[in-house]
Image (tube, rainbow, N blue to C red):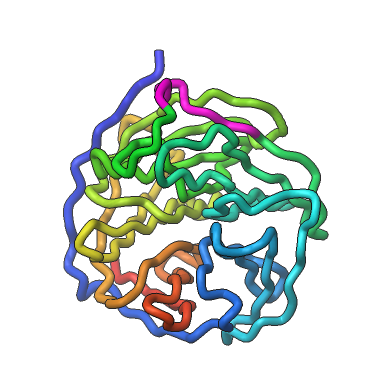
Amino acid sequence: MRIIIFLILPLLCFSQITFTTIKLDKDLVETSGLEIYGENLITHNDSGDKANLYVFNPKGRLIKSVRFHDIKNKDWEDIAADDDHYYIADTGNNYANRKNLKIYIITKELIVKGEISVSYSAQKDFTKRALNSFDAEALTVVGDSLVLFSKNRLTQKSELYTFPKKAGDYVLSPSAILKVESLITAADYNQTLDLLALTGYNFKGDQFFYIVSNFIKNGWNAIALKKYLIPIEKAQIEAVKIQDISNFLLTSEGEKNGFARLIDLKVTQ
């Protein structure tokens, strides 16, 4: 039997967060995912771009872009990685009317290797609607699995879905439901630290950061998130990468014709 878990989260003081920001190249105005690429970083835009990956250095300077001609960017929302592959989540589903949700498997040499198709067991209606529970923008690797977090506009909770990181077709049911009280936009998991990080925002535009220590060790029955308010304005944070237990990299989309930003965030726990 699958166990569904509801979590009550404490809101911690935003004074426990400090950060600096760097402007990103204009080609990255809709950055929506973040991973490591050698000594640099790799990102992509969401539905406003072609099927491109972009490599930039820690100072925000664009180094190169790679165009894929055999796949499409319907709505790329996150990128995750293990030792051998990147996984690009083409799972953006703002109006719950998509039937072609995919995760693309890309080698570290940036060659398309395969794809994973996903659908939701609970979805029977594909009528276009803004308030829905079948959008997902956050993906990470946990061991042999991928974990996808929903961006639920109906409940502002987040369903957590796990499935193999192998090519195939998977029908998803939630392993847990997180009471985040926001719309989750990004995820990252560090196996060495057993640490999960998430980002999200609410309908007022407040930006939030979450961490879960001992994510696997404690199991589904003891997930405990810490929630932080990020004191940043005119930004929607869309990506996160764990550096160590206290330091994290985030990216935000460009707002109102502004530049996207790389955010170096530090949490005092």
Query: Residue drawn at (54%, 23%), measured in percent from left and top?
Result: 171
Q: Quadrant of the N terminus?
A: top left
**Quadrant of residue 95 within the rendered picture:** top left
| Residue at image coords 32%, 25% | 4
User: How far from the left and from the top, in percent, is residue 83?
Assistant: 71, 52
- Image position, residue 68 (x, y; %): 77, 58
Does residue 60 belong to the magenta stretch?
A: no
Q: Is residue 154 above or below residue 49?
A: above
Q: Quadrant of the C terminus?
A: bottom left
Q: Is residue 65 left or right of residue 205?
A: right
In this view, the residue in front, 145 or 72, is 72
Residue 232 % position (x, y) = 28, 76
Q: Report the side of 254 relative to 115 (left or right).
A: left
Q: Looking at the image, is 159 positioned above or below residue 10?
A: above
Percent x, y for residue 71? 74, 49
Residue 117 figure quarter: top right
Q: Is residue 99 left or right of residue 57?
A: left
Q: What's the magenta region?
A: 117-125
How many labels sit on residues?
0
85 relative to 59 in the view: left or right = right
Q: Residue furthest front?
A: 127
User: Which residue corresponds to the image point at 21% horizontal and 71% vertical from the top-left?
Assistant: 14
Above or below 23: residue 247: above
Q: Quadrant of residue 254?
A: bottom left
- Residue 124: say if magenta: yes
Q: Residue at x 46, y 43 (%)?
A: 93
